Image (cartoon, rainbow, N blue to C red):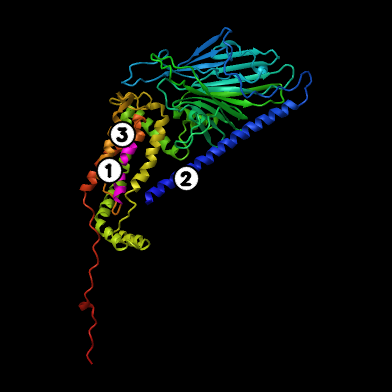
Amino acid sequence: MDKTAIIVVTLCALLFGVWLVEEGKVAQEQNRARAIFDATNQVAQAQPATAGGTGAAPMLSSAPPVSFPTNLAEQTLVVTNARARYTFTSRGGGLDRVDLLDYPESISPRWKKTKVAGDTTASLNTRAPLPVLAVLGDTNVVGDGQFALTRTGNSVLARKILPGGLVVTKRFDLGTNYLINASVRLENPAGRPVPAHELVTGTATPMDVDDNSQAEGVMWYDGASAQDQLVSWFSGSGFACTRGAPRAEYWAGSNNVVWIAAHNQYFTVLAMPHEPAPRLVARVLDLPAFASVETDPNAALPRGVQTSLVYPTGTNSVVEHQIAFYVGPKEYRTLADIGLTYQNHADNVMNFGRFWGFFAKVLLLAMNTLHDLTTLGYGVVIVLITVIIKTLFWPLTAASTRSMKRMQALGPELKALQEKYKDDAQKLPAKQWELYKKHKVNPMSGCLPMLIQMPVFIGFFTMIRSAIELRGAHFLWVTDLSKPDTLFMIHAGGMSLPFNLLPLLMGGAMLWQAHLTPPSPGMDPAQQKMMRYMPLMFLVFLYNYSAGLALYWTVNNLLTILQTKLTKNLKDPAPPAAPPASNPALTRTPKLKK
């Protein structure tokens, strides 16, 4: 096994080990959160009856209702402002859905002729069985789930008196920037403690029938870091191609839930309690099929992730929860402002990550700034950013290309050293480094530009994954920079393959670049061939990724080719002249005659 294969295997083993450790941490956190919650409720249940009551409320059922009865008449209230339309329902007494007036539901590609029927405005919590801020638990806190709704200006009030006497009052005050200030008050006039309960904080759902990104999930923040579990985690996905047992619930938190978000790729329902919540739970559920023109009866139902804040049985007869909601797009600047206002790092819902997040934020801010200053489309802005980055890296790339040329010139001498010391594996590297030092060549300089630009590439990859600005952005034939630029479908042998032009151009440019790049002297021929056709692997991996990333990488490769050609035409600086050899005849000391 050569050195490259050993490095690859070692990295894969390390990644697998990290994944196992992280999965173990998640399992331990869920078990601890559920055990603490159950123990708290068991202690409360064992307490003696309070004066005027019949005892503490039973602990929360592990399977709360997934919907409310539909045989009762439903009352709805609709409140609209400049940016969104809010629909409230009496079934559960909560926010049924939010329509975002500035965003379309979907952007149909050129090849697709059918469209999703119904409203074309992007909406959140749509087709979810329960509204936002539905109260779940046993019959003492749920009843029939039917609330009375009233409206005063931009405020909506939902109220219900349960058969046991518990009074539940909810208030929603609509603000700006997709913000809602809400409160839930549970009051037990008999003086009994308020039973354990959950507050539904939203359901992550796909936007349309073509939204198969599997980006729906639950994210929460504990004051130090954010954790994210996607819908694929509930299906039992694991490291690489490994599969595990399906999971129905995700439990986390220990009196440190600063915020919880039900999110998909570009939108989120973000719940921010004024005081950190005790725990959270998320459940995967099947959603109704999309109302499309063409319905496949064998197609799997879309899946969503329902999120809730969990409150155990307390000791007070009156409990009030105050929660601020952000229900809107993952727009970084807006979320960053909200994070500063509430001091809770709400922008972490962008899921940029810790290390690569710095580069993703810088690139996103640069892209938005260029777009605002030039009023150009985001496709042109991506091209401009790529040109700026390549210009900044030009001195480094030029020096690297010159070094690679000098390395290539040393090929015969390196080959001679390999032949001479083929049986001495310890002495060969030392002699090679002596040769490099003699000719002032750094064998690592060829990799340096790639290593430095890799964070930029990963930053672009991370940023484009969540940048709402690219959703629906046009460029030449591309109708949506956030999705593949599929021009048409190729049908053959019962299979359908999308024809994506930008990734093909990207692959061609990478092959051209690999052909122009001289191989390192002494590299094994098999490794040379593998490196030359490495672009084909990138083409396979990125073929169905967003057109924005393919555009960036294509322009980057074309500019690299131009740089390579320009640098190859430049003459290397003349090496420093060697000091003149001394003449023994001139320096010989004459003998003195006696």
Q: Secondary structure at mark 3?
A: helix
Residue, disc 1 = 514
Residue, disc 3 = 384
Question: From mark 3 to mark 2, how far is it between C-alphas?
Answer: 38 Å
Viewer-closest of 110 and 261? 110
Question: From mark 2 to mark 1, how far is it between C-alphas?
Answer: 29 Å
Q: Which mark is residue 14?
A: 2
Q: Secondary structure at mark 2?
A: helix
* Magenta-colored span: 524-538
> Residue at the spot x=38%, y=34% of the render?
366
Seen from this angle, which residue lies furthest right?
A: 51
Q: Which mark is residue 532?
A: none
Q: Are marks 1 and 3 in contact (CB under 8 Å)?
A: no
Q: Amino acid at mark 2?
A: Leu
Residue 221: which quarter of the image? top right
Q: Position of residue 156 (x, y in %)?
A: 57, 14
Residue 275: which quarter of the image? top right
